[in-house]
Amino acid sequence: MEIRYGIAVSPGIAIGPALVLDTEGVRIPYRTVPPEQIPAEINRLRQALREAAAEAEETHKRISARLGQALGNIFGAHASAFADDSFRNEIEKLIRTQNFSAEYAVSRGIREYVKKLEEAGAKLGEHAGVEVRRRAAEMIDLEKQVLVLLLGHRDEPLLAVGSPVIVVANDLMPSDTADFTPRTVSAFATESGGPTSHTAILAGALEIPAVVGVGRFLTDVSGGDIVIVDGERGLVVIDPDDRTVAEYEERRAVLLTRVDRYDALRDKPAVTLDAVAIRLLGNIELAQEAAHCAERGADGVGLYRTEFLYLNKTADPTEAEHYEAYKSVLQTIGPDRPVVIRTLDLGADKFSSVSGLLSNEKNPFLGLRSVRLCLRKLDLFKTQLRALLRAGRYGDARIMFPMISTVEELRQCKTLLNEVREDLEDAGIPFKSDIPVGTMIEVPSAALLADVLAKEADFFSIGTNDLVQYTLAADRNNENVAHLYNPADPAVLRLIRMVVEAGAREGIDVNVCGEMSGEPLYVPLLVGLGLRQLSATPRKIPEIKRVIRQLKVEEAERVAQHALRLETARQVSNYLRDQLRRILPETVD
Ligand code: PEP
Ligand code: MG
């Protein structure tokens, strides 16, 4: 039995036979052709590209209908690449000048381009090069699609399997995952990939348990071997022993009954035993996930990460694209529930190759990112703000600025928003003028200055993902410092307390929208610290609601007071675990 650790990108547990998807897979039978065959080779290439474009267009439509426009666009981009004249001309040139067979020319042409992209990606560095490397991976996906057509065979192992399999692969391309359904694929695990890769985002949208970035493990798995994918903890167990299988079967059963039981809570209110209401909101990345919030009984959207409008885009989104996305979320959620739309939080680990981001920053996490970038690229920022104000008419929209670290930044954002309001007014364009404006508290300086910021913001939302990272100086994506990265750290708890108190003094709402609020472990603590709103990934909402409905505020306050007196993250975690075990034993395993 082997246990490998990766990044959990979609929760759930699956046990089953592995299906190894070979990404190299397609073997090219010959490299060159006699000169007289060149016209025929070119025709074959053109025919294959036409078919590939038609297939990609078909997938574009199918996926857009199933999972929404943003994910469908991955394939729209494939279709355009196949139909692109310069792409075709480059490959034809290789056939004409080098006598390459169509297959070999496709492979050679694409691989050379990929190599250039990878070199450029390496020069840009780990963070800034992410998008370029993603493009390189996509080109490999395109290569595979054309080769399969040219070679006249395609392996569709998924269609052949009778019962669900666990797909393991070096990396999965969007064209591989697009047609996964829980009926054919019960989970997947990949050697490469990060939490914001297309594959990770698709896994979340498909609601299939998944672990990515496991590192080399395919050499240890053969098709049919039993594998466990634990999308809760981010691990893969290869060839588990009987005891581990039994343990996981039990955990899986508990999880499934818990999901059923929690789903039954959907329409019940999130109130404590002593009748204090807690507003539970959903975090979303894509507009169509608003429906998941509604399905899971969320009271609205607490965080819409609009930077995901850059997914599958090579240019900045237009005002119309922003507008349509916000309008659709607001309409799905309805007029009586809030939708907090966060302005673009680009840079560092998110869409870092966007135009205007500095590619040579030594430390992009402390660089020109997020609201700092927006305040530098005013056109970009104004385009988004215009769309936000215009779409605001379709519901209870709220605007939130990310990564605010000084009060001047908040003032500049508000001034700009006023300018945009005036422009819209002058132009006679309808918009909503009284949209509440809040700020994320995710930089320690903002938490320390919360009393000042609270006088100028309509609400706060504590972004614990970044607050933990910046407070402890521990990169949230670096496993080498993962032992330091802990929301239970007493330093973090003190900052949260300061923010809640500052909010209460000024009478503004305070929310927590980092992953911390989706963890049952922290619910008693957060409620005890005075939070009356939590925003989490929609799938976590029923579980959080269950804890709230078993809790008394008085008791939660005692938990918070005790936790604040502890000195280490470990002590806090252990204490919270004991408390949760007492309040709701089923959530602690
Ligand atoms: C956070 O930092 O806690 C947060 C919610 O924002 P993101 O995870 O998008 O950085
Ligand atoms: Mg953040």
Image (cartoon, helix red, strand yellow):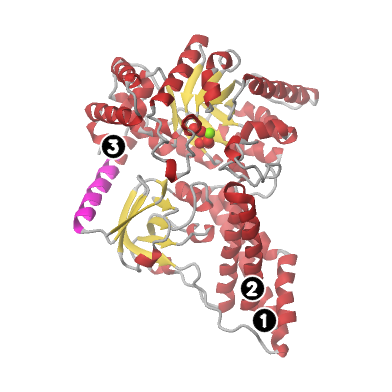
Mark 2 and mark 1 lie on one chain; the one further toward the N terminus is 1
- Label at residue 261: 3
Residue at mark 2 = 108
In space, the residues marked 3 and 1 are separated at their CA atoms by: 61 Å
- Camera-nearest label, 3 or 1: 1
**Magenta portion: prevailing SS class:** helix
For image coordinates 46% across by 31% down, the residue present is: 472
Q: Which residues are magenta?
A: 242-258
In space, the residues marked 3 and 2 are separated at their CA atoms by: 54 Å
For image coordinates 57% across by 68% down, the residue present is: 145
Q: Quadrant of the N terminus?
A: bottom left
Q: Is residue 517 above or below residue 364?
A: above
- Label at residue 479: none
Q: Residue furthest top?
A: 505
Residue 334 relative to residue 519: left or right:
right
In percent of width and height, residue 34 lies at 68, 90
Q: Are marks 2 and 1 in contact (CB under 8 Å)?
A: yes
| Amino acid on which the number 1 mark rests in the picture | Phe
- Label at residue 100: 1
